[in-house]
Amino acid sequence: MFYNQTVDKGKLKKLIAWAYQNYGSARCSQMADELKNLGFRFATKAGVSISVDDLTVPPAKRQMIESAEQEIRQTEQRYVRGEITEVERFQKVIDTWNSTSESLKDEVIRNFQVTDPLNSVYMMAFSGARGNMSQVRQLVGMRGLMANPQGEIIDLPIKTNFREGLTVTEYVISSYGARKGLVDTALRTADSGYLTRRLVDVSQDVIVREADCGTNRYVELTAMTDGDRVLIPLSDRLLGRSLAEDVVVNGEVIATRNQIIDDETAEKLGRLVDKIKVRSPLTCEAARSVCQTCYGWSLAHGHPVDMGEAVGIIAAQSIGEPGTQLTMRTFHTGGVFTGEVARQVRSPFEGTVRFLPGLSIRNVRTRHGDERDQVEAPGEIKLTPKDKTKETVTYSLTPGSLLFVTDGETVSEEQLLAEITSDKVQKSTEKATKDVTSDLAGEVLFSQLVPEEKTDRQGNTTRIAQRGGLLWILSGEVYNLPPGAEPVVSNGDQVQVGDVLAETKLVSTNGGLVRLAPNSREIDIVTASVSLDQAEVKVESSAGREQFIIHTGDGQSFLLKTTPGTKVQNHAIVAELIDDRYQTHTGGMIKYVDIEVAKGSRKQGYEITKGGTILWIPEETHEVNKDISLLQVEDGQYVEAGEEVVKDIFCNSSGVVEVIQKNDILREIIVKPGLLFMDLEPESSGIAQEQLIYPGTQLTPEVTIEELRQAEWVETNEGLGLLLRPVQEFTVQDQSTSPTQGSANQEGGRHIELRSVQRIFFKDGERVKSVEGCQLISTQLVLEISSEEPESVSHLTADIELEPIEDRDCQRLQLVILESLVLRRDSDNDPLGGNIQTRVLVQDGDEIPPGAVVARTEIQCKEAGEIRGIRKGSEAVRRLLIVSDRDEFILPLAVAPTVKARDLVIAEAEIAAGVLAPNSGQVLAVDKTATGYEIRLRKARPYRVSAGAILHIDEGDLVQRGDNLVLLVFERSKTGDIIQGLPRIEELLEARKPKEACVLARKPGVCQVEYQDSEIVDIKVVEDDGTISEYPLLGSQNPLVSDNQRIDVGQALTDGQANPHEILEVFFNYYVDSLGSYEAALKALEKTQMFLVDQVQSVYQSQGIDIADKHIEVIVRQMTSKVRIDDGGDTSMLPGELLELRQVETVNEAMSITGGAAAKYTPVLLGITKASLNTDSFISAASFQETTRVLTEAAIEGKSDWLRGLKENVIIGRLIPAGTGFNSHENTAGISDYTPPEEEYNYNNRSYYAPPGGLGLPPRPGFGDSSEDSDMILDDQTARAYAEGDVVDLEDDEMAFLSSRGSSRFSRQPISDRWSEADEEGEEDDFEEDYEEE
């Protein structure tokens, strides 16, 4: 064989594939080996290596960069002059650098080809050995534009390459992308691994189990395109597929049904037909598997797939493995469309352009801000050459193309004539915004700009530019005034450096005594104060804590309840009297006699308003909450002090026990002390329950009561007895004494004092549960602040201070009400304000009246000039402007100027005959001088604002440098790279709803598109039966259809990703009435399947990864095999159940025979995770995710697992039902009548599972004869079978491949065992038959 071509990577692939197909793997690998040696030998002789000298930078680079920079300088000038907007400038810069980078790349290639075709770098990149064009471009061209972390393109390109070396700035910009790449790779590995795991899980039980399912269904294959570009040609998609019907071209049968297409046939068919019907795993009717014919070739060896091949796992690995090569997401280009949308047409020669009749054009503004003619309807232009020997050329123009020439214009060679837009590519656009910030401080002026206010539903007002125009900033120094500052100058005043512009006053609201510490930024004003002048405060420590004790002159001691230096609220407790007059020893009952209390809270206590007596009846209460069995005494028993009443609980006093229990739990034990008399009766004695017995009362002739007691009749274990309980009396005064105080209060202002208050903590008749005793009454000192205006007091607080007393080591307590005023820090360098000076107007110890000014902050002028921009009234803005000499410039003229005062002049505009303005500005005055004229201008800067932009400022506003002026709203092409790569694959395979889904047509018909205020609001479709359907659009959606356009069912009406669930629903609802549920479901599922397959393919193709369709089809088949039951009819199926479509249809057929109501269902699309969890095998589902949920549900439902897949068998530890473990008797469909005799085993032809006649393939030449040096597949069982009989003689040059592939027919297990296995599996089939009969 002779092959005379330059062999690069692609050619090498083809060569090896050809050798493999024609000569088998043994010879092919030998050839590859020799080629390797050849390659190394010549590489050694040639000495191909890479050195710095090989990196030659094309000499034209400098000139290219210079011309790009020149173009950008002009663009910048146009922007500064206000001719183009910020967006147009940005777009132009990006496009300029993009095209420069591209043309430089072409120049690099040309330079290599012309000057050094044997350059190592060039050879490596172009042979496909290492590197690619983009890397070579960065080595010797220019690195080009980079994106920032937000994914927006930085408009500063990297002009250098790695050979020249990067500058520091360029290096930093580069490092954004480098870091992003690293992070991306790390995240990608994990994502890709998880994707593979889910894919394996969803498809692991798809095994080839039969030879031919015999279906007549098919899918139609066409070449896969994107716009004009062919991604996968038809011939590539056909390779290794089985045909669904004969292909007849011009009456000649080219290929027959079930024929598997090889290379030659694929090439031939690709040339002759556009679309072709093939069998596919999607339409295979084999239950829970795929048949050989529908699957076609096993791509590993280019022969029909073997029986028992685990095609599901192969498919999962084929899709999952390239996942790491997919980018996570390409940079979202920040509004820059990088794709080649328009094709540039350049003139091939010098000549004249003519527009042919029927060419309709209109003037538009391009995205670079140029005025151009745009073609409205398809038309043509003609180019007539100057040189009569050349032929006239005609160019066809599509709508939307831009013309760069006029009718009749003479053009030179290589001049740009037009940019023709591709009509195939749907250009979808989205709204984007860009902020424009001010480059200088000053005041705003609108020129030709018409603002319009729009109010939205929430009542928010936005100001929008109704007509585009210029927004001017007139230069000046803007001062930001601090809050509360009032200007002391007015518009038009002339000010000098250091003059006060505005001032802030610091005012005391209450007045009082000034306290001012040196170097402090706080001024404290004492409004009112009170001190305990006769009392001393000493610090004592108890239990390791410091306590402040107040000793008054009359011997009382108070404990300070708050820490000195803190603030206390009005009515707060400041101190508490230390006394034990009202301390009890145990718990008991409390009774008031003549005492009155005010309302209050339990926590604070009740204030006593009128004194009297408290009667206290002691009792000891133990709260137990233990089991009743621990009780040591009985209810009503008399106990002595110290006796054990409950295990480990002893009573402190003698008395009668009362036991309180509930539900055998001992709650409380009450010991009531007192005298117990047993021989009295209530009636005869005349003593009532709870009656008070006074001293001297004669109870019986022997007993006289000595002190006050309370009578209580109690049940004891010996009968009824009278218990006389002791009563303690506590006398309470009307008013408690309070220590003397000296106070300094304002006249008629606030008043502050400490009031002494007695508080009781228990209500009348309350029972106090306690063993130790408690404090009944407490005397407290409470802070009282009063004022003539009561509402001004509520928020006031007082500070607690300790004043030292002279000559003593103790202190005095003082409470003061302070007003704290904070002074502003002086700053000379506030960039946006002037110099700020603060002056304090009071001294320490001054008395000041309310409303007095304590300090004054002044803002001083930094530069002499004229005051502008102060607004009075409701529009007052906290800014003012000074126009100084720096903001003006003077132009002397010899001739009379053409401008007058107040005119706005743009840079490089003519202001007098032959005189151009050096800068933009506003004319202030035109003066006549001795030598001519003098124009005084104020510096200014124009900004172009496009219509529809949102204005942040108003005319006359003052802006600082860097303030936002407007938000430009513009349309940009949606870049296809927003969601791409792995996230998009995941979105498709998990069947997620896209964020912005497109609107699909529910029925075929004719479109009517309605416009309102140039915004499209409504698309109506007049359907074939006359009904009109409305499709409302969201704001972000753009229509893809035009008025009166004919549309089909399921066609996208707007841009955006299609929602696969919606595709399924639309087609099912459309077909269900005419075709019935089953056919409609099949058709709808088929549409969804093809959509998913094509979408997944296009993502992988966009990254240059080739995957065979059949792998994606196997996965998609698993996602689209289920239906959801809506109504079970007379079957045993439940609504909401997810079942296989075929299974439901089988039951429904049985129903139609028996006359029962069939089940109604809707097809569903499950994502791979959901499909894995909904698989028949619960073991497989549980080992995937949500183990507990899956297993509990399976247990509740009593599920059986038939162990059909690989995973279940691996988990349980059985042989997997694939490869050698595949049991042929499980599927007798294709092979029952074919048992080859022992001596005729054909080990060369691997299709020994095929039915008689094979798969419709012509036999390969030399099959079975050993003269053909083809591959021999020999598995271990076969070898054993051989070993027992004949001796096999293999020729030296023949290679024996030992592989585990083959049939388990050679298994050494006894036949009887295998039949018993078959019986078990037969049971499973019986179960299914029973299920169907139901």
Image: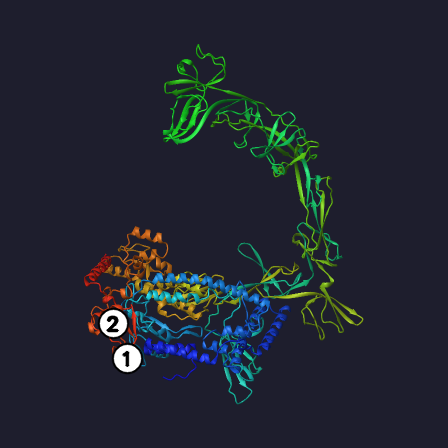
Kindly give the residue lying farthest to the left in the view shown: 1312
* Residue beneath disc 2: 1248
Q: Residues within 10 Å of mark 2 (few under 14, many from 20)?
A: many
Amino acid under disc 2? Tyr
Q: For the residue labelled by badge 2, is the local secondary structure a helix, a strand or a loop?
A: loop
- Does the rendering let one see residue 364? no
* Element type at mark 1: loop
Image side of residue 1277 versus residue 1050, left or right:
left
Q: Amino acid at mark 1?
A: Glu
Residue found at x 45% / y 77%? 127
Q: Residue at x 65, y 26 (%)?
A: 553
> Which corner quadrant of the image does residue 915 belong to?
bottom right
Nearer the observer, 315 or 952: 315
- In the rendered image, which quarter contains the N terminus? bottom left
Q: Horizontally, is 914 left or right of 14 in the view?
A: right
Q: Position of residue 843 (x, y in %)?
A: 74, 42
Q: Going from the N terminus, do you reach mark 1 or mark 2 first?
A: 2
Measured Cα–Cα span from mark 1 to mark 2: 19 Å
Q: Residues within 10 Å of mark 1 (few under 14, many from 20)?
A: few
Along the line of sight, which residue is nearer the eye, 80 or 742? 742
- Residue at the extreme right: 930
Where residue 1251 appears, x then y in whole percent?
23, 71
Q: Which residue is mark 1?
A: 1268
* Residue 720 visible (yes or no): yes
Locate residue 771 relative to residue 945 in the image: left or right: left
Q: Is residue 95 above or below residue 1147?
A: below
Front-lying residue, 412 or 636: 636
Q: State the image coordinates of residue 705 (x, y, percent, origin top left).
A: 47, 14
Numbered marks: total: 2
